[in-house]
Amino acid sequence: MIVNASPKRPESFHVTSGMLAFTALMFLPAVLAFAVLISAWVVSDEVYAAERAAAAGSPTEIATWKTTVVGICPIH
């Protein structure tokens, strides 16, 4: 039995590119959800006004991405 009398020094902490990529991927869904929420909040009034105008009989043109963002966001 070999006994090591001197304890090993703990290795210093290294921030690697893999650790940074993992951290970025962990926060990516929250950042995307926040971006969808904010963008839906910004364009929701315009989309709802266009829907009300279409229901009243005067067609209005609205960008497809705006209606999609408002449709995706569960709050709006």
Image (spheres, rainbow, N blue to C red):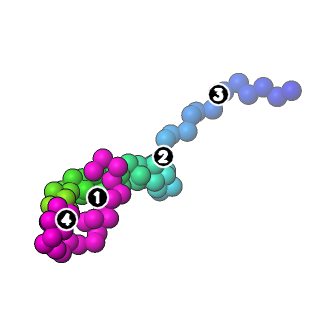
Q: CA distance from mark 2 to mark 1?
A: 43 Å
**Kind of residue indicated by mark 2:** His
* Of residues 54 and 43, the one drawn nearer to the viewer in this rendering: 54
Check disc 3 and report the residue beneath it.
7
Q: Are marks 1 and 4 in contact (CB under 8 Å)?
A: no
- Nearest to the eye among marks 1 and 3: give it: 1
Q: Are marks 2 and 4 in contact (CB under 8 Å)?
A: no
Numbered tag placed on residue 18 in the rendering: none
Compared to 20, does 3 lie above or below?
above
- Is disc 1 placed on a helix, strand or loop? helix
Residue 22 appears in view: yes
Check disc 2 and report the residue beneath it.
14
**Image quadrant where residue 43 sits:** bottom left
Check disc 4 and report the residue beneath it.
55
* Of residues 61 and 73, the one drawn nearer to the viewer in this rendering: 61
Q: Earlier in the sequence, mark 2 or mark 1?
A: 2
- Is disc 4 placed on a helix, strand or loop? helix
> Residue 34 appears at what percent x and percent y?
31, 50
> Residue 29 appears at what percent x and percent y?
41, 52
**Range of magenta residues:** 51-76
Question: Which residue is at 46% across, 54% downward?
Answer: 25
> Residue 71 appears at what percent x and percent y?
33, 59
* Of residues 72 and 48, the one drawn nearer to the viewer in this rendering: 48
Residue 50 appears in view: no
**Kind of residue indicated by mark 4:** Ala
Q: CA distance from mark 4 to mark 3?
A: 78 Å
- Is disc 3 placed on a helix, strand or loop? loop
Q: Earlier in the sequence, mark 2 or mark 4?
A: 2
Check disc 1 and report the residue beneath it.
70
Report if residue 69 lies within the magenta region.
yes
